[in-house]
Amino acid sequence: MMFLADEEVASQWLSESPDTREIFYLQSAVEFSAAFFVPLSEKCRTAA
């Protein structure tokens, strides 16, 4: 995950490889991150 300076920078970054890159707005990024990292951290905690 990367945080880009603004919409102009994000558009330029996306145009360099549109098939392999995706832009999330903040709310979507938070939901996506939580869906990935919360279960991962719980598995790590129970495995320790």
Image (cartoon, rainbow, N blue to C red):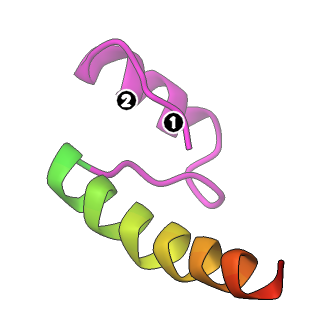
The kind of residue on which mark 2 rests is Ser
Circle 1 residue: 15
Residue 11 drawn in magenta: yes
Q: Quadrant of residue 9?
A: top left
Instruction: Give the residues drawn in magenta, as a range.
Output: 1-24
| Total labels drawn | 2
Q: Is residue 26 left or right of residue 34?
A: left
> Are the two marked residues, 2 and 1, in contact with CB atoms closer than 8 angstroms?
yes
Identify the secondary structure beneath mark 1. helix
* Whole-percent x, y for residue 41 in the image: 61, 71
Question: In the image, is residue 48 above or below residue 33?
Answer: below
* Whole-percent x, y for residue 46 in the image: 70, 87
Q: Residue furthest right?
A: 48
Question: In the image, is residue 42 above or below residue 28?
Answer: below
Q: Is residue 29 left or right of residue 40?
A: left
Q: Is residue 19 left or right of residue 35?
A: right
* Whole-percent x, y for residue 7 in the image: 25, 23
Q: Quadrant of residue 6?
A: top left
Residue under the image location 52 percent in, 74 percent down: 36
Residue under the image location 32 percent in, 55 percent down: 29
* Whole-percent x, y for residue 17 in the image: 64, 44
Identify the secondary structure beneath mark 2. helix
